[in-house]
């Protein structure tokens, strides 16, 4: 902690305008147009041919070993939601907003994320499918948060209030799915979409350039 005259600066929160600018920037990473794999890239990706081996450099999917663009999109979205919805970060937002009115707080954060996640579907069917995957990843992230005991009461209440209001705005099929998910225990919730483990190429024990 800072003591007068010791030369250490007191901690200062990042300015609210900078936090909101950073939020708007990171939300671009869950845009379906950004997450959609181009067709010419998808065509180059070969089916998995090493059944039984560790799935290094492979995105988890539901296509039986074939490339699953939606699985890759879900993993990409998870990276964003893991950062934005970290429970400690949400609690800090709550505390900062308590001390300074008008700052970015949990309700306004969820609102901004929701605007990006539930924006009107793109005209292209593939982008619409990617958006639906992102929506499910977002909602599951919130539900998993509520299943943990890591949120301040105010942070938890903000998520519950948000989900209650959102449910009334969603299409009936999605709203029913959301209600079913919220009724599950933490152990019954689907696992988060994982990104491939390890380095992009091989691992630390491999020397790909050793012969050069």
Image (cartoon, rainbow, N blue to C red):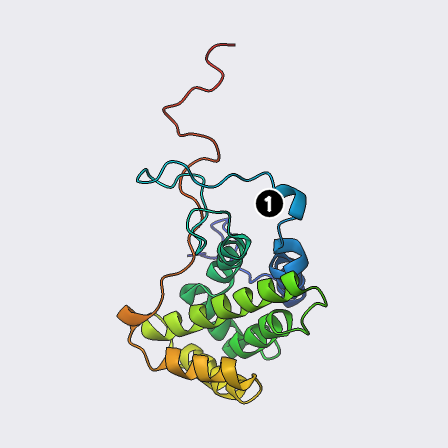
Q: Position of residue 111 (x, y in %)?
A: 59, 77
Vertical placement of residue 62 versus 159, above or below: above
In this rendering, position of residue 59 left or right of residue 24: left
Screen quadrant of the N terminus: bottom left
Q: What residue is rendered at 53% in x and 86% in y?
A: 172
Q: Position of residue 90 (x, y in %)?
A: 46, 69
Examine the rendering and report whether any part of residue 11 can be seen. no
Q: Nearer the viewer, residue 45 or 157?
A: 45
User: Residue under circle 1?
Assistant: 42
* Badge 1 element: helix
Labels in figure, total: 1
In this rendering, position of residue 62 left or right of residue 124: left
Q: What residue is rendered at 55% in x and 74% in y?
A: 110
Q: Position of residue 15 (x, y in %)?
A: 63, 64
Q: Nearer the viewer, residue 22 or 33?
A: 33
- The image quarter in which residue 22 lies: bottom right
Q: What residue is rendered at 48% in x and 74% in y?
A: 94
Vertical placement of residue 28 versus 173, above or below: above
Vertical placement of residue 111 versus 200, above or below: below
Q: Nearer the viewer, residue 24 or 32?
A: 32
Q: Nearer the viewer, residue 154 or 135?
A: 135
In this rendering, position of residue 42 left or right of residue 71: right
Q: What residue is rendered at 43% in x and 19% in y?
A: 207
Examine the rendering and report whether any part of residue 122 can be seen. yes
């Amino acid at each position: 902690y800072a003591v007068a005259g010791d030369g250490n600066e007191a901690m200062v929160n990042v300015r609210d305008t900078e936090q909101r600018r950073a939020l708007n920037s990171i939300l671009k990473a869950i845009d379906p147009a950004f997450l959609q794999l181009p067709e010419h890239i998808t065509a180059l990706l070969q089916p998995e041919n090493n059944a039984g081996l560790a799935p290094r450099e492979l995105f988890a999917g539901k296509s039986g070993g074939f490339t699953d663009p939606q699985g890759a999109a879900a993993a990409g979205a998870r990276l964003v939601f893991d950062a934005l919805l970290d429970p400690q970060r949400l609690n800090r937002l709550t505390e900062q907003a308590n001390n300074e009115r008008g700052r970015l707080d949990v309700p306004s954060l969820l609102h901004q994320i929701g605007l990006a996640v539930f924006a009107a579907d793109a005209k292209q069917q593939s982008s619409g499918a990617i958006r639906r995957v992102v929506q499910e990843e977002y909602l599951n992230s919130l539900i998993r948060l509520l299943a943990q005991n890591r949120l301040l009461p105010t942070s938890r209440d903000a998520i519950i209030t948000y989900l209650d209001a959102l449910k009334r705005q969603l299409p009936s099929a999605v709203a029913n799915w959301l209600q079913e998910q919220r009724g599950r225990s933490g152990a019954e919730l689907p696992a988060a979409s994982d990104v491939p483990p390890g380095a992009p190429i091989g691992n630390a024990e491999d020397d790909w350039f050793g012969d050069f």
